[in-house]
Amino acid sequence: MNYHPTAPADQARHHPERIFQAGLALHHIANTAYPIGHLTTMRPYRVITPEAQRLAPLAWQDSPRLGLYVHIPFCEQRCNYCEYCVVDPLQIATHEEVYFDTLEQEFDLYRRALGDSARELTGFDIGGGTPSAAQTRNIARVLDAARRCFDLPDTVRISIETTPKIAAQHPEKIRDYHDLGVRRISMGIQTIHPRLLSEMGRDSTSLSFNRKAAEAVRAAGFERFNVDVMYGFANQSLASLEATLRHATSLQPEYVTLYRVRYKGTRIEAQAAGVTLAEVNEQAQLAKRMLLDAGYQGTPGKNTFSRLPGDPGTSDYLTGRVIAGTPYLGLGLGAQSLSETTLAYNAGAAEKRLERYLRMVQAGQLPIQDLYHLSREAAAGKMVSVSFYFGEVNLDEFQRKFGVTFEAMFLDEVAFVLDRDYMEYRDEPGGRVLRLTEAGELVYNGVIPLFYAGAVKSYLLGLFGWETAALPVEAEHVSLR
Ligand SMILES: C[S@@+](CC[C@H](N)C(=O)[O-])C[C@H]1O[C@@H](n2cnc3c(N)ncnc32)[C@H](O)[C@@H]1O
Ligand code: SF4
């Protein structure tokens, strides 16, 4: 399937300096979560609902290899900072079985929709929510369905998420995951600060849970263990972040992922105003220094630090997305999918409720709530934003994917970041990259939006209060070339 023609709004050109300044001022939203304001900025690409069922499968015709993500929206509790699609925790008791029945049906719908030739998986994540909140036999059903519907090579390291509390209290679940072939496990420590944990409504982290969880992970045989640490909370002191990182590294995980709090759409959204860019930069620098000193590797702007040489630390699924823009299929409530030419959100992404998702799948429909048929510019904006998860753009992969050089598409923007020494060219084993410098890392939120599509840049400028050409509102339509 071809790209959609570029919408007039995406042809808008903006001076890099203006976008850079707007990104810095709006640093809480100018990040790798792309696109911003999709109801407006992606509107020209929106496929009308009845067409979505027909168009969505066509979009996968050109993707013999893809990543798979399965979303489990259950948690024992809902943390106040969480941005993910998680349903009311009480629903796990009443809806777990029907959810996994429906997930299996969704797998089968895609198997039929994608036709006979099995797609090869390049990565497979079971995420959430908290997948380990579910019973192991249901996780086993997900793994069986993936093996039934896709070609899943043994070399792919399947990854799963847990909380410290569940891993500590149910080591048998962790062992079962390893027995089922899962090879990477990730758990959120977030912080060890008692006040912050209680303010965030999170009792699943405590020093004793964390230690017992790490023991359970090792006893199960996992050799790839990631812990998440968060920074950028209002009133989070450097001392408490330092103590959290000291504790996190004492668990000796192979990987540590740093998450800067994203406030948009969370219960703590109002607190964003109290957190400055200077504060989060100071925290990020401290965290990076401590991780490098502890023997972890990480390049400027990269969120995941790894102590295994040559291993970026992210799951195979995410690594493919970040480096090569590998298409991915997301199954389950609110899951996002990206083919070469479409972006889709499953039902439930906005309302975080199960009903619509369950109803659509049970009626034999792909549970797609929003489908966008992307232009090349829109697809490039998505790929490049996600690339900044590693703080760099792989130029060879970009050219392979879009058929033009990165410089041809972003001439002024590349000149801007090179002139200012915010990015630099590097020849790496995986190809030539344009990578953030140490100086560029400090203005990360100004650099990323330079590579957004035109409409998203206009939207950002509008939020910042800078005059911008009004985005044309176009009728919803579909193009089926
Ligand atoms: C889907 S959660 C899964 C982990 C598991 N449920 C837990 O809480 O331990 C993945 C990670 O996303 C991060 N996260 C959640 N909400 C976030 C937000 N609003 N901004 C940035 N990171 C967030 C947390 O570090 C969390 O560990
Ligand atoms: S951070 Fe983890 S446990 Fe907390 S609500 Fe989000 S997914 Fe659930």
Image (cartoon, helix red, strand yellow):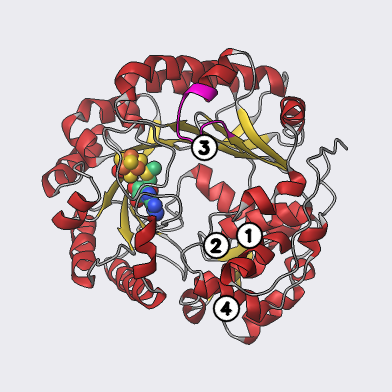
Image depth: mark 1 or mark 3 in front? 3
Q: Can the viewer see residue 333?
A: yes
Mark 3, residue position: 349
In this picture, which residue range is highlighted in magenta?
A: 346-356
Marks 3 and 4, Cα distance to the nearest angstrom?
31 Å
Q: Secondary structure at mark 3?
A: loop
Q: Quadrant of residue 260?
A: bottom left
Which mark is on residue 388?
Answer: 2
Residue type, mark 2 in image:
Phe
Mark 4, residue position: 21
Q: Is residue 349 magenta?
A: yes
Q: Nearer the viewer, residue 198 or 112?
A: 198
Q: Is residue 391 magenta?
A: no
Residue farthest along the left direction in this orientation = 208
Residue type, mark 1 in image:
Val
Q: Looking at mark 3, is its residue's CB closer than 8 Å to ligand 1? A: no
Q: Looking at mark 4, is its residue's CB closer than 8 Å to ligand 1? A: no
Residue type, mark 3 in image:
Ala
Above or below for 419 versus 231:
below
Q: Quadrant of the N terminus?
A: top right
